Image: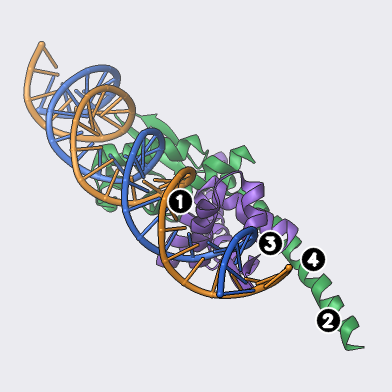
Chain colours: A green, B purple, C orange, D blue
Amino acid sequence: MLQNDTLFKSLGDPTRRRLFEHLCLEGEQTVRALTERAGISQPAVSKHLVVLKGAGLVAGQQRGRETLYAAQAGALRPLVEWADEMTRFWEVRFDRLDDLLKRMDQ
Amino acid sequence: MLQNDTLFKSLGDPTRRRLFEHLCLEGEQTVRALTERAGISQPAVSKHLVVLKGAGLVAGQQRGRETLYAAQAGALRPLVEWADEMTRFWEVRFDRLDDLLKRMDQ
DNA sequence: CCAACTAATAGCCATTCGGTTATATGTCCT
DNA sequence: AGGACATATAACCGAATGGCTATTAGTTGG
């Protein structure tokens, strides 16, 4: 579960998550475009992109003097799987409780 | 999307996420039991539980002098929905690119 | 060739955060 | 009643974090 740590941590910061959201919804963007929209300095954006890249959430390809970043939505899969697993276990327990209550009713 | 901020932030800390995982997999636990397993001090655990409760991920019911905490797995739904939405948008764009490439092939 | 432009890095700072110990509050048991 | 126990809160501390400005490196176009 160590891989999940960087994934969840990356998405834990609102600004960073918004950058990722924007890339998902609007498609690949230059750092410049992302900066204008984020309302923070260009170096701050670049630092966030490094973190997102470290989690596999984003990939950047250089084209000339600018770099195009694109979301890698597949990187979200471990997150969904984790959530499903947690929910599944939780529901199993709920079912057991339900059974217990039914047995107590009778 | 402001509600998601606290949710993602709560899960962003590994220790905290592990507490939640434990409650999901093992069922409700006292603070004492959680503390023994977490390997940190009892106040630290209590603080994490406050944060998790703030995100709706956990609920505590006092019973005598101890408090039983239980996971609220339903609180994960916004997270899954968010991930689905991001993936959906991303795939739409991918399809468009796919179409474009097909058109270019012909 | 050089000035403008784009992005990344370095260095700095204030704040946040996760941990600690000490203490308060409340409950149980003898 | 009083001591042990369970949890929450307060106060504090060092490390991590997210932001900034300044600078560097690389690219383009006149």
Q: Nearer the viewer, residue D17 or A16?
A: D17
| Tag 3: amino acid | Gln
Specify which label sits upstream in the sequence, 2 or 4: 4
- Give the structural element (helix, strand or loop) at label 2: helix
Q: Which mark is residue A92?
A: 4
SS state under label 1: helix
Q: CA distance from mark 3 to mark 2?
A: 20 Å
Instruction: Determine which of the numbered discs, if any, sits on residue B29 in the image.
Output: 3
The quarter of the displayed image where residue D1 is located: bottom right
Does any portion of residue A96 appear in the rendered image? yes
Residue position marked by numbered label 2 in the rendering: A101
Query: For this view, does C27 lie left or right of residue D9?
Result: right
Chain under callout 1: A
Q: CA distance from mark 1 to mark 3?
A: 26 Å
Q: Nearer the viewer, mark 3 or mark 2?
A: 3
The local secondary structure at tag 3 comes to strand
Residue A64: in sight, yes or no? no
Q: Is residue A56 above or below residue B87?
A: above
Q: Which residue: 47% across, 49% down?
A: A11
CA–CA distance in space, label 2 to label 4: 14 Å
Residue located 50% across and 54% down the image: B43
